[in-house]
Amino acid sequence: MPDEMLHLPLIHRLLERHKDTPGALLPILHAIQEGCGYIPAAAIAEIAHALNLSQAEVRGVISFYHDFRSTPPARHTLRLCRAESCQSMGAERLAAQLREQLALDDHGTSADGQIALRPVYCLGACACSPALELDGRVHARLTPERLRELVSDCLEDGTC
């Protein structure tokens, strides 16, 4: 049985709970993502059937909102601040370093699924630019060396 088929009992419970709510699609998608970590492909037909929508409509909403994931999340999420203060202190150079070190783009996930890179446009650490958030923890006054070390730690032993 494919891994995402394991999520079907949860999906069915969530659909039963929310399907009669006006505007149920977004609450259902949020609940499924919270429960599964992402929106499994197997959920799309189930959601469409329960809400009398086409699968294209469901996919369209999932693809429109960037916070919905259709694949399992990376083990670690790195959010590099790209706002003005961080830009002026070298964030673009750090972004280029990350893209090279992880071989991905600004919204990508490393090939091994360990780290997802996401730009963010303020972490509230402007006085300590440049800054990033790694798994919910802010790291400020980053240098290229410190960034390389943080990423290497995540890739080597999974702890950040």
Image (cartoon, rainbow, N blue to C red):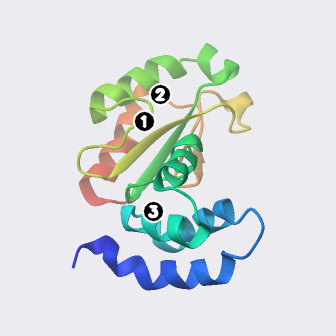
Which numbered marker is on residue 146?
Answer: 1
Task: Please say whether residue 80 is visible from this viewpoint.
Answer: yes
Callout 2 secondary element: loop
Q: Position of residue 75 (x, y in %)?
A: 38, 58
Q: Amino acid at mark 1?
A: Arg
Q: Contact (CB < 8 A) between labels 3 and 2?
A: no
The earlier-in-sequence mark between 3 and 2 is 3
Q: Distance from label 1 to label 3 (Cα)?
A: 42 Å
Q: Distance from label 3 to label 2 (Cα)?
A: 43 Å
- Residue labelled with disc 2: 143
Which numbered marker is on residue 19?
Answer: none
Q: Contact (CB < 8 A) between labels 2 and 1?
A: yes
- Residue labelled with disc 3: 44
Q: Position of residue 61 (x, y in %)?
A: 58, 48
Quarter residue 1 falls in: bottom left
- Which mark is nearer the camera, 3 or 2? 3
Q: Amino acid at mark 2?
A: Thr
Task: Please say whether residue 160 is visible from this viewpoint.
Answer: no
**Which residue is rendered at x = 35% and y = 40% of the image?**
149
